[in-house]
Image (cartoon, rainbow, N blue to C red):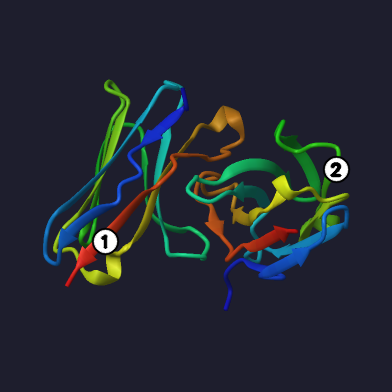
Amino acid sequence: QKEVEQDPGPLSVPEGAIVSLNCTYSNSAFQYFMWYRQYSRKGPELLMYTYSSGNKEDGRFTAQVDKSSKYISLFIRDSQPSDSATYLCAMSDRDSSYKLIFGSGTRLLVRP
Amino acid sequence: DTGVSQDPRHKITKRGQNVTFRCDPISEHNRLYWYRQTLGQGPEFLTYFQNEAQLEKSRLLSDRFSAERPKGSFSTLEIQRTEQGDSAMYLCASSLRELAGYEQYFGPGTRLTVT
């Protein structure tokens, strides 16, 4: 079993829809939770990061962390075709030198 | 552009050849990480540097792989005697330890194809 599980998709939604992306993890030591967006053949782009449990909002994006369930989510409101990409969740903890443990990514397609 | 840069962007090599990649981190970022990403997977940690010191290496980093960060600035990743299984995207990321080591910014990657 992988430390971080993520549904690979693809997830196809119409423009304007609310998108929900999720990851589960097994290592209770994780303290920091990140979401990256990766366009085809490009490097990952940091979207948001959250420390411990709770919610964080940035524009159309909301990240949620539930440490008790070992479950994190990224919501995208008013999705746009330009949001079409692969979304990677990543996690780390201070005792592991902050190295990132990634999920396999969810491919999102927003249809015009 | 003040982001992380990597060179070359693409490299095609024959099995058995040596290759070297370069990463220039964001200025003043003292932590530098190398990851490897294969198709359909998330990046996997290879190694990281705090300034010029290499502090951790993954089990994925076989003896054919070596990384350096002279003077704590740019870093190089060398693969000797390449194998077809080395074909992947090699990603470099940097962070500023004093702020948050987990806040890592990635470069565009070097795509390696071993024929």
- On the image, which quarter does residue B5 sit in? bottom right
Q: How many marks?
A: 2
Residue lying farthest front? B115
Query: Which image quarter holds the C terminus of chain A?
Result: bottom left
Taking depth in this image into account, of A77 and B51 the one nearest to the observer is: A77
Percent across and percent down for residue A78 are 14, 63
**Disc 2, SS:** loop
Percent across and percent down for residue A85 are 35, 61
> What number is the disc on residue A109?
1
**Disc 1, SS:** strand
Q: Is residue A61 left or right of residue A90?
A: left
Percent across and percent down for residue B53 are 80, 44
Which three-letter amino acid code belongs to the residue tagged 2? Arg
Q: What chain is tagged by disc 1?
A: A
Q: What chain is tagged by disc 2?
A: B
Taking depth in this image into account, of B73 and A19 the one nearest to the observer is: A19
Taking depth in this image into account, of B57 and B36 the one nearest to the observer is: B36
The residue that disc 2 covers is: B64
- On the image, which quarter does residue A25 sit in? top left
Which three-letter amino acid code belongs to the residue tagged 1? Leu
For the residue carrying disc 2, how many other residues have a C-alpha within 10 Å: few (<14), some (14-19), or many (20+)?
A: few
> What number is the disc on residue A13?
none
Against B21, residue B2 (above or below) is: below
* Separation of marks 1 and 2 at Cα, in angstroms: 39 Å
- Residue in the picture at 53% in, 40% down: A100
- On the image, which quarter does residue B29 sit in? bottom right
For the residue carrying disc 1, how many other residues have a C-alpha within 10 Å: few (<14), some (14-19), or many (20+)?
A: many
- Residue in the picture at 28% in, 20% down: A68
Against B58, residue B36 (above or below) is: below
